[in-house]
Image: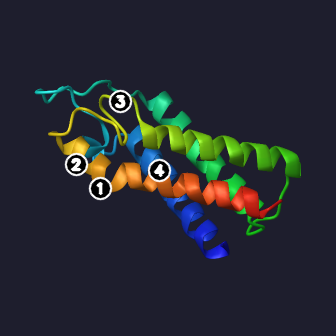
Amino acid sequence: MMLWIAISGFILLLLSAIHVYWAFGGKWGASAALPKKAGSQQTLFVPGAAGTIIVACLLFSAAMLLLMLGKLLPAFLDAAFIKWSCWACAAAFMLRTIGDFNYVGVFRKVRNTRFARFDLYLFTPLCLLLSAVFYAATAWAV
């Protein structure tokens, strides 16, 4: 279990760093990271720097919580807060896995865009894995 926690924590830290890169103007990977409208090359939304930094902070926080729960980092927060926060992370990643029933997630309808292919093979499976790791780590830490 510790290996899965370490790998997942590293992935979350890497994703956080990528979001910081995007927030400061980076372009690598950005074209595949945003859903496009059906039959169009127009993205559903254009994230601003502040929103992207907020996502980076949330990903970083999730990594820290998971690593503290797994005792790979010293816990500087209350154990109950860490545990409940990790339950929330498991739920959030599961909701992302399920998706919006249109553009993202397992039940998306739009399937013929570059984002949809990345979502099918990378984003949604990764969210399912992260949800499972958060769930298992939280149940294991009982």
Which residue is at a point 24% across and 28% down the rendered structure image? 43
Can residue 117 be seen here? The reply is yes
Closer to the camera in the image, 133 or 32: 133
Q: Specify the farthest residue to the bottom.
A: 3
Residue at mark 4: 127
Give the mark nearest the N terminus, 3 or 4. Answer: 3
- Quadrant hosting residue 40: top left
Task: Please report whichever mark, 1 or 4, sits nearer to the chain's N-terminal start.
Answer: 1
Residue located beneath label 1 in the image: 121
SS for tag 4? helix
Mark 2 and mark 1 residues within 8 Å of each other at the beta carbon = yes
Distance in Å between CA atoms under marks 2 and 4: 15 Å
The residue shown at (55%, 34%) is 54
Amino acid beneath label 3 = Phe
The circle on residue 117 is 2
- Give left or right: position of 65 versus 121: right
What's under tag 4, amino acid-wise? Answer: Cys
Between marks 1 and 4, how big is the CA–CA gap?
11 Å
Number of other residues with Cα within 10 Å of mark 3, as a class: few under 14, some 14 to 19, many 20 or more = few
**Place of residue 59 in the rendered image (x, y in percent of width and height, measured from the top left):** 56, 46
Q: Residues within 10 Å of mark 2 (few under 14, many from 20)?
A: some
**Amino acid residing under circle 1:** Tyr
For disc 4, the neighbor class at 10 Å (few under 14, some 14 to 19, many from 20) is: many
Residue beneath label 3, please?
101
